[in-house]
Image (cartoon, rainbow, N blue to C red):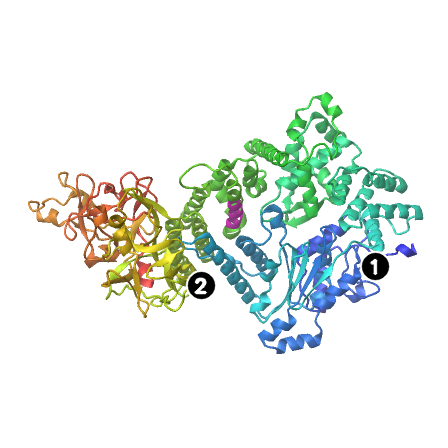
Amino acid sequence: MDDHESPTLLFCKKPENNSDRKQDEKQLIEVASIPDEAISSLERNVAETSNFSIVYDNESSQHVQYANNGLKDPALIPRVEILEQIVKHFSSSKEEVKIFEQQNASDRISVHSKMLTLRGMGGLGKTTLAAMAVNLIELRSAYDHILWVNLGSNFKVESVRNNLSYDMYLNCLRKLCQQLNIKTDKFDCELFLQPGDTKILISGKVLQAMEQAKMNMAHLVNNLRILIVLDDVWSHEDVDLFNFGEHTSSLCSILITTRTLDLAPFQGSRSIEVNFLNASEARYLFLVQAGLSFTVSEHNLEVIDCIIQKCGHLPLAVRAAGRLAKTSKKIQLKLILEEILGNIGGNVSQGISPIVRILDHSFLFVTNETTAFAVKMLFSAFALLFQTDECLRPWVSRESVKLMWVALRLNEGSEELKLSWRKFNLTKVDQITDLMCEMGLLDRKIVKLENEISDTFFRIHHDLMWDYGKMFATRYDFKRISTMSFTEQSQFNFNLCVYDFSDNFFNQNLQRWAKLLIFFFIKLHQVQRNEYNDYNLNWLPLHLMKAGFLNDASNMLKNENFLTDIFKKFGLEMGMQSIMSFMRTFERLYQTLPVVDTPVYTSPMILVIYSIHDYITKFNSLVQVDCSTRREIGSILIVLGTELHKYSEWTTSLDYYTEALEIFYLLNYDNDHPDVERVVKHMDSCVVQRLMLVSLDSPYRIKLKHNGKNTASKFSLELSSHPGYAIVKTEDKCKTIKYGKMMWSYVYLGIGLQDSALEVNYDGCLTHRDQFICVALGALSEGMPLSLRSKTLFDGINVEEELEPFNDSSLFTIDSDGSVYPTMAPNLCLGFSPYPIMYLVRRNSPNRAVLKYTTNLNAWKEPDCCSSGSDISTRSKKTRNGVILELSSHPGMGIVPFFNEMTCTPKLNNVKVLGLGLGPLELALSAKVNGKNHFVMTQKHKGAALCHICQGDLKVGEEVFLSTPFHKWNYEFVSNDDGTISPAGAPHLVLGFQVPGRSMYLKKR
């Protein structure tokens, strides 16, 4: 054995308690804790292989060590050279630590933040090497904390991308916080979008938000020595997101494992190519996994070497072959090895990789071909059913595994398959899981729960094994197999090459297995309602989606009992994260459905968000909760509001933010409290003040930061008069309007946060791409809004006559101080609405308008009154004066006009219009209701009435303003018993404003 001798390692009985070992190490020297993922990676290689274990030397405080080179805590494969390189790269001498502590932050970043990449194909043991390295005392004593994040599972699931999304990145940061035992609330969504943001603008904001999240994390680890293991990196861009040393005085080093070649070099970084095992290492691994001693006959060693060669010296394949030898039913070692060699070297179909061939032959310990096929089917179903968008190989409870395997054993496959289960005594979940763990297909861990109760969890051992499970599902039509006659079954060849790869088979099998599991669960649940609660909360919504039951999945996520159970089990914060995971998976699958020709895309997840909101607010009002729980409720409301941004539900988002703010104020948070600042910024992102023409002496005028005269290129419409703000679009999509034979598209402009600023060119007109800024309807009057509109399409009309007002309304002059005024109306300039705009909100919105004198308003309804403002001189003084539109929802406030005069619109038959908003009571309008349910003004702007212009289904956010009669607009409203005003036919909507209806908010803000 001289030529094949492995590096010298000592083995002995495993320690019974790993926590005792950690405690002894702490007493010897301050070292970083080993990440759970690293411990798990090593345990899955060592556990259940044999009686061998790693050596614990009592004379050195039970530190595991190599006998020859002094490296401590080696794991299964003694790849000493690579481990020595890792230790040398990351370990710091006492002199280096002293220099580090004396240096300033900038010097520390450039000199002491280190990076090392372990690169190689899948299955070479990169993750195991990283786990071995962070077990070493030399490495652990150099850092305060060692953290671990697996990045690759995200991209196995969502193969359309290979770098982290914003949600993925936040999830990774939360995992780092959990390992540091610190709160994760800094990494709720901090993406501040606005209604007019385009996809390109949103992409830019996402990058900014990720950079801000990175800085927040850097602040948390400031002054700490950190080593981060980034396992299975797919893009070098992701690495920089975890280089927290750029923003701190921390020693932040990174150990990377990757299969890709695109990792760009960083300063102070180096890479190690992880190659195949050499002959000595490969033989050592095989012997340990096979449970053999190192005193094997020369003939058997030659066969082992041939097996290793067939395995390509790939660690995962050698490990699988060793497990196969251990689980063989043959008595003589010679026969076992020769059978394995023959099977591995057999003919395989084209396109099957060596590792897949080895994994497939791992099932050969089951001598019956039919039963082996059935075990493969169960493994494939496990891999695909218990996989989430966030994790390729999650831990699954024994309860859920049992449910799946019993469901498939009873309902899937042919009668021959079912008989084989009983014949080989594989009918119980423990029998099957023990078998798969022994084969090395599954990892197992035991977790202590409450009341000293333990539960067992399982997961797929390696990503490549998950790939095998997926590949297996693409090759068989299980629907056909389950309907075969006995004659067909006897002729069916259960081998790997029955069919070619097919996505149709994959999707069909996945849906079939999910349906079998769901129906079996429902049947059991009707009898044993309290059983399988773990499956119900963790997996049932996901499996409903995988089965194609999207409506049932969305209904489940809205179900009050489900919400109660999930929040009770996981708590508010973790429960909400679990629900959000389900929602994102739903949205991904929902978008793959055939496009329905509807004017507006509406996701069922909007109603799910509404239901969660109603549940949370009900819980907040009915249950006595402590301050910490109430704060979590406020944070959930912010998350829900942010999710609604994806569906342009800006008005409802503002409602949720308002409710969160109210909770924070009830907790006596000041305006400078981080939670208050955060929610107020979200509120500001939803509220866009309308851009309009104002008088030159108006306090609401604006000034641009750039006047466009010193640049020939485009410039940003940021404001110098209001720092931090800019001219922005109020919606992300343009509306199309037809007037006569003309047609154009437009979107209104407003004042919003500067990171959404519109960029324009200026040559007398302010143009943005193929659109230009103009005054609405060409009416150059105070109060008229400005829009970004397209060129006009027309047919058979007098161009100059029809377009002259529109051409004039698009000419602007920019003064040297940044003031902007219409060239044809220099008495006016650009400004914004003086009061929060009035629009439609939900009936229960905290931003709704509640009139103080609604009863009087209804009592004074006059059937013979018309909305045209006919003679009212003969009516009583009380009726003639109407009812003042004072608000009880906003004490001291009322519904007020933006300006003193209404604006005439020549292009709309001289109809007069005027914006309405929330203002001081002394400026409030007075009104009455006529026989047509028109709310008609009685004193100022007499004869004008409330109206909206929507011709279809009304939605929140539709503006309500003042207008004289126009046949295409809607003037009918209804006064409700609670003091709110609803449009006729839409009782679920009421008048409201872009500010909360709470006096305490107005006082504090």
Q: Amino acid at mark 2?
A: Pro
Residue 566: x %, y % from top left: 52, 45
Q: Magenta part mainly helix, strand or loop? A: helix
| Residue that carries the numbered disc 1 in the rendered image | 9
Q: Indicate the secondary structure of the residue bearing disc 1.
A: loop
Q: Residue furthest left?
A: 874
Depicted 833 relative to depicted 533: above or below: below
Asked if residue 63 shows in the view, the reply is no
The quadrant holding residue 599 is top left
The quadrant holding residue 277 is bottom right
Please tell me which residue is depicted at 84% across the width and 64% down the height of the picture: 68
Q: Residue furthest right?
A: 298
Please tell me which residue is depicted at 67% across the width and 44% down the height of the picture: 466
Residue 469: x %, y % from top left: 68, 40
Asked if residue 416 shows in the view, the reply is yes
Span shown in magenta: 575-584
Residue 267: x %, y % from top left: 64, 68
Q: Indicate the secondary structure of the residue bearing disc 2.
A: helix
User: Where the C terminus falls, by quadrant?
Assistant: bottom left
Q: Amino acid at mark 1?
A: Leu
Which one is nearer the viewer's eye here, 313 or 78?
313
| Residue that carries the numbered disc 2 in the rendered image | 674
Q: Is residue 668 magenta?
A: no
User: Where the N terminus falls, by quadrant?
Assistant: bottom right
For this view, does 341 lie left or right of residue 604? right
Q: Residues within 10 Å of mark 1 (few under 14, many from 20)?
A: some
Depicted 909 relative to depicted 120: above or below: above
Which one is nearer the viewer's eye here, 294 or 236?
236
The CA span between labels 2 and 1 is 54 Å
Mark nearer the N terminus (2 vs 1): 1
Please tell me which residue is depicted at 57% across the width and 38% down the height of the picture: 546
Depicted 341 relative to depicted 130: above or below: above
